[in-house]
Image (cartoon, helix red, strand yellow):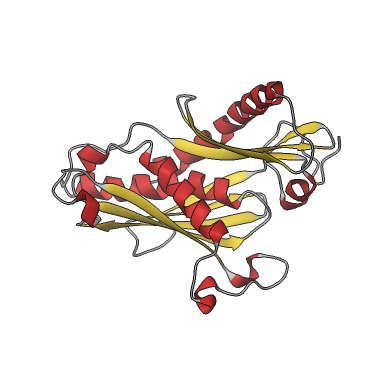
Amino acid sequence: MTRHDGRQWDETRPISITPNYQRFAEGSALIETGHTKVLCAASLEERVPPFLRGQGQGWVTAEYNMLPRATNTRTPRERDSGRISGRSQEIQRLIGRSLRAITDLEALGERTVQIDCDVIQADGGTRTAAITGAYVALYQALKVLVDSRAVRRIPLHGAVAAVSVGLVKDDLLLDLCYREDFDAQVDFNVVMTDRGELVELQGATEGSPFPRQRVEGILALAARGMEPLFAAQRRAIRQL
């Protein structure tokens, strides 16, 4: 099928990651995937949550927010309602899990890395872009610890990135924009490491059930789409 932006079915949107985007954060990155833009910042704290005190390991956690005019119409700030939406809670937990999966928490020591992901512009794939960009912000923050000799090495097991795959009009498509995501019969978000290991797989149908064999095709397509993401991460990290 012909895609709205002229891409092939197995092609990601153009991706760029600008590291060190914020002056004061220990780590930061602006990630752009097509028209989606997410600002990711990493802050270091010399403490851990109460449930980890005295256990000799650190913690990585995340918050996710969307600016009011990131979308076609204004979305009120969640703080105006006094509570975080279920969607935002789900996404920020996903980001935190994804980053902890590749972090050596014992080597980090009793420290917390707080990741803040703010969507500046949303055209589909905000959660996957947040994970991919947050990794660069995390890496930079951990490099600060190495440079200050607080730790001997960057406490990471590898890189992590995420991409969406959907079934639109019976065609599998990689890295959905908003319009494709809206039309998708099946929509998956896939989180993987740079060693090809699965971190998380989120998927659901908007209509009829789909055969298990479809999942194998979705995973294969997602794996193919990971390399441009990891390449963009590597380019960004080389600039630090």
Q: Nearer the viewer, residue 220 or 9?
A: 220
Is 91 positioned to the left or the right of 48 in the image? right
| Residue at the spot 27% in from the left edge and 53% down from the top edge | 112
Q: Nearer the viewer, residue 70 or 231?
A: 70
Residue 51 visible in this rendered orientation of the protein: yes
Q: Give the image quarter of residue 146.
A: top left
Location of residue 53 in the rendering, given as x and y in whole percent from the top left corner: 17, 51
Is 130 positioned to the left or the right of 99 in the image? right
How many numbered circles does the render carry?
A: 0
| In the image, farthest residue toward the front | 209
Q: Give the answer, above or below, for where 41 lies relative to 213.
A: below
Q: Give the answer, above or below, for where 213 lies relative to 160.
A: above
Q: Give the image quarter of residue 151.
A: top left
Q: Give the answer, above or below, for where 67 lies relative to 209.
A: below
Position of the N terminus, as image quadrant, is top right
Residue 189 visible in this rendered orientation of the protein: no
| Residue at the spot 13% in from the left edge and 48% down from the top edge | 54
Location of residue 219 in the rendering, given as x and y in whole percent from the top left corner: 62, 27
Is 90 positioned to the left or the right of 154 in the image? right
Q: Give the answer, above or below, for where 4 lies relative to 79.
A: above
Location of residue 36 in the rendering, given as x and y in whole percent from the top left corner: 63, 54
| In the image, farthest residue toward the left | 54
Location of residue 192 in the rendering, given as x and y in whole percent from the top left corner: 50, 32
